[in-house]
Image (cartoon, rainbow, N blue to C red):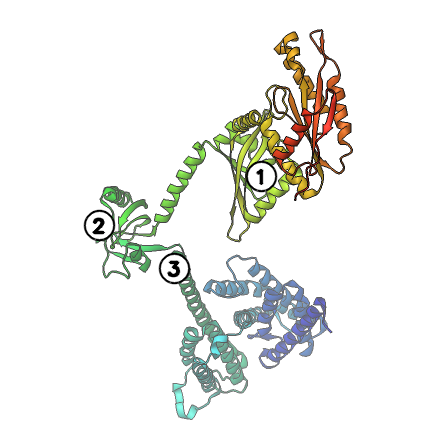
């Protein structure tokens, strides 16, 4: 079953209390005066470490552990509670001061971290050293004569525990994995073995007969140096902890260097010894560790800088300004065309590569930078060793050292210069092009327009940018048109065609439009470029020419050319569909008499009205054309049956027979109609027309006649 977070916290608090109580019981049992005052108080370091790592929520574990330790050595519950309160206050206050100090890190990576820990321990130990002895005094365990010495020993004990145990826990919470790498295992084992034997010899009297007075306590400092240099913070703290245990064990058994009949005297010596060892070993280890971290950070920084310079194809240089000699990276010399570093490079080597046209400018700017102790920044063209001309950009930073130096970078910017030239040319073309250009995003929102766009549409950039391209919509195209257009754009990224749009003033115009798409590196649409020009006049001219070529200028209906084209198309459609097609030739009789009586202008008006009457007599899909002066032709298309042809012929005769009124003069027309049916009379244009014309010749006035059926093929 998985425990809840508060259950885990509760178990940790209980574990902390048990560990605190056991550690306190050991110290008070073996190294205390009357079971309360000692010079060695390891639980103080444990309590501070718990608050630093776990926060104030562990106060209960420290209090219960300190309270239980008092009960275990026979103190009353009141004395135990008072001492426990002092110990808890000491740990809480120490953690509060350290965690609120921006110059302190619980990772203990710098000597200042240990200095702040020691200073804080000195301050907070005063509270425990005040509360604890005063509690003993009030309960008659201490007298006024022994109060101050007791406070001093209490303060020394807590200070010692904080200086030794807290760093040990903070550092050793992360295991030193590099100790047991295959190449380091022999040294690690040798260090542990020799350190243990040294401690046993000094503090427990091993090999005393063999070594005599040579086994003195100062040998430990050699191992501290070894630990600091090779095993860092972990090694130093492990060695100090080992030394503390061995020295206290030797004192308890009256053996070794600190053996004394009076335990307090021995504890004082051990306290001073371990304090000195800690004050020397931990700062030394932290100093070396900090230097190692700085060196690694510098190496990483150099690696990142090298990677960055290589990524952007940039070389670095360091020029001494007195003798003009320079140190460079390999990329620096490669920019000048060399395959590897030259044995020697000077400022004169560089200036020799600059093309003559730029040489004076570069040299002048360099000398001004040196004279004014300012930075140097320039662009110029160089001639590489292989003769190729390239553009470079360089920047140097003046360093007022002794002797003064200038450090900087150099970059081949030829491609950027060419790209900039192309960009300027493109912008020049964009601004001065006679064709309108509109750039949109993938969603058709306008992001840029050129002056020609404003000239053609009437919309200024401020009116168009940020708006959808539908701004120009004329409403003349249906949904199917735009669906087809966007389908082409989505499939191929392009569209070409003519489209009707509307200017800002509401005027319609037609434009020849080309749309192209720019894609990003992932193949997604990034920009769409619309290029168009106004073809309204051209379209009007084309439409006028088409009308002139296909419509009768007098009546406005189709002429002979359009008649033949449409008749040919409709015959082909009739063949495919199986429908009938009828051709009606209308001939108006004695129209010359009308012209002579009413005049040609009035005669033209009558012809125009006659053409409109014929148009109103047929469907919109049928074809009506004027073949000659008074001869009209009608093509009835897509007929399922032929029995309706006569009705239309009668209707036309009736309409044309109705009087025409022109300037209060009346005129009547008489006509005759010849009818030919496809495929009954013919299957092709000319034969069908000839059949209808032959029929009209045999037709009487105000009547119609069908052409005779064609003879079957032999």
Q: Is residue 575 above or below residue 543?
A: below
Q: Quadrant of residue 155?
A: bottom right
Looking at the image, residue 296 sits to the left or right of residue 398; the answer is right
Residue 54 in view in this figure: yes
Q: Quadrant of residue 442?
A: top right
Measure the C-alpha gap from mark 3 to mark 1. 43 Å
Depth check, mark 1 against mark 2: the one in front is 1
Say if 141 sits above or below 617 in the image. Answer: below
Question: Which residue is at a point 50% across and 62% down the rendered structure image?
Answer: 116
Horizontal placement of 157 versus 360: left or right?
right
Report the number of discs. Answer: 3
Q: Earlier in the sequence, mark 3 or mark 2?
A: 3
Quarter of the image with the C terminus in it: top right
Work out whether residue 38 or residue 386 is closer to the camera in this orientation and state it: 386
Q: Which residue is mark 1?
A: 445
Q: Position of residue 556 (x, y in %)?
A: 63, 22
> What residue did someone put label 2 on?
352
Give how far apart the Cα atoms at labels 1 and 2 are.
53 Å
The kind of secondary structure element at disc 1 is: loop
Residue 468, percent from left and from top: 60, 37
Q: Are marks 3 and 2 in contact (CB under 8 Å)?
A: no
Question: Against 643, is 12 above or below?
Answer: below
User: In what element is the residue under mark 2?
Assistant: helix
Single out the mark in the foreground, 3 or 1: 1
Place of residue 95 in the rendered image (x, y in percent of width and height, measured from the top left): 59, 62
Question: Which residue in the protein does label 3 denote?
Answer: 306
Residue 539 in picture, x, y percent from top left: 54, 29
Q: Residue furthest front?
A: 714
Q: Is residue 35 left or right of residue 349?
A: right
The quadrant the N terminus occupies is bottom right
């Amino acid at each position: 079953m998985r425990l809840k977070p508060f259950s885990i916290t509760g178990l940790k608090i209980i574990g902390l209390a048990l560990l605190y109580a056991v550690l306190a019981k050991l110290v008070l049992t073996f190294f205390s005066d009357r079971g309360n005052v000692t010079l060695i108080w390891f639980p103080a370091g444990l309590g501070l470490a718990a608050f630093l790592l776990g926060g104030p929520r562990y106060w209960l574990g420290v209090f219960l552990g300190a309270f239980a330790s008092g009960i275990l050595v026979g103190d009353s519950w009141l004395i135990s509670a008072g001492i426990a309160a002092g110990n808890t206050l000491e740990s809480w206050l120490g953690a509060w001061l350290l965690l609120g100090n921006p110059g302190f890190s619980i990772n203990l990576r710098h000597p200042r971290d240990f200095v702040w820990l020691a200073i804080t321990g000195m301050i907070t130990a005063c509270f425990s050293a005040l509360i604890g002895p005063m509690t003993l005094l009030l309960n008659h365990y201490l007298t006024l004569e022994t109060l101050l010495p007791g406070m001093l020993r209490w303060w020394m004990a807590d200070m010692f525990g904080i200086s030794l145990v807290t760093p040990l826990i903070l550092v050793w919470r992360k295991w030193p994995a590099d100790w047991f790498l295959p190449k380091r295992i022999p040294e690690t084992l040798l260090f542990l073995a020799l350190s243990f034997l040294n401690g046993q010899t000094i503090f427990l009297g091993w090999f005393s007969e063999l070594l005599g007075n040579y086994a003195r306590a100062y040998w430990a400092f050699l191992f501290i140096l070894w630990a600091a240099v090779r095993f860092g913070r972990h090694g130093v703290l492990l060695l100090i902890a080992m030394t503390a245990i061995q020295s206290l064990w030797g004192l308890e058994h009256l053996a070794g260097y600190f053996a004394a009949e009076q335990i307090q005297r021995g504890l004082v010596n051990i306290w001073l010894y371990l304090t000195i060892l800690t004050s020397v070993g931990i700062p030394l280890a932290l100093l070396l560790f900090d230097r190692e971290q700085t060196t690694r950070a510098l190496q990483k920084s150099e690696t990142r800088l090298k990677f960055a310079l290589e990524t952007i194809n940039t070389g670095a240089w360091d020029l001494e300004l007195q003798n003009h000699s320079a140190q460079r990276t390999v990329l620096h010399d490669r920019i000048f065309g060399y395959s590897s570093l030259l044995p020697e490079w000077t400022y004169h080597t560089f200036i020799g590569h600059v093309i003559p046209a730029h040489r004076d400018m570069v040299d002048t700017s360099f000398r001004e930078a040196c004279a004014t102790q300012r930075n140097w920044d320039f662009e110029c063209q160089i001639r590489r060793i292989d003769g190729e001309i390239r553009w470079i950009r360089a920047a140097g930073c003046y360093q007022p050292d002794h002797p003064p130096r200038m450090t900087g970078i150099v970059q081949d910017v030829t491609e950027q210069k060419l790209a900039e030239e192309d960009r300027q040319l493109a912008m020049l073309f964009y601004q001065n092009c006679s064709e309108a250009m509109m750039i949109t995003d993938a969603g058709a929102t306008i992001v840029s327009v050129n002056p020609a766009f404003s000239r053609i549409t009437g919309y200024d950039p401020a009116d168009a940018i940020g708006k959808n391209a539908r701004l120009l919509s004329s409403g003349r195209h249906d949904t199917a048109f735009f669906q087809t257009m966007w389908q082409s754009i989505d499939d191929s990224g392009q569209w070409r065609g003519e489209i009707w749009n509307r200017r800002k003033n509401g005027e319609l115009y037609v434009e020849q439009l080309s749309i192209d798409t720019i894609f990003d590196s992932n193949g997604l649409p990034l920009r769409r470029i619309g290029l168009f020009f106004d073809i309204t006049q051209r379209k009007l001219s084309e439409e006028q020419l088409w009308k002139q070529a296909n419509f009768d200028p007098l009546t406005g209906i189709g002429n002979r050319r359009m008649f033949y084209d449409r008749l040919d198309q409709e015959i082909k459609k009739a063949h495919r569909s199986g429908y009938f097609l009828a051709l009606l030739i209308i001939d108006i009789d004695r129209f010359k008499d009308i012209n002579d009586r009413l005049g040609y202008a009035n005669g033209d008006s009558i012809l125009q009205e006659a053409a409109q009457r014929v148009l109103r007599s047929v469907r919109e899909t049928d074809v009506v054309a004027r073949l000659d002066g008074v001869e009209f032709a009608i093509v009835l298309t897509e007929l399922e049956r032929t029995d309706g042809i006569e009705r239309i012929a009668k209707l036309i005769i009736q309409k044309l027979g109705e009087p025409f009124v022109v300037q209060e003069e009346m005129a009547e027309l008489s006509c005759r109609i010849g009818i030919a049916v496809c495929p009954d009379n013919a299957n092709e244009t000319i034969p069908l027309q000839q059949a209808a014309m032959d029929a009209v010749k045999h037709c009487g006035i105000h009547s119609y006649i069908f052409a005779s059926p064609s003879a079957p093929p032999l």
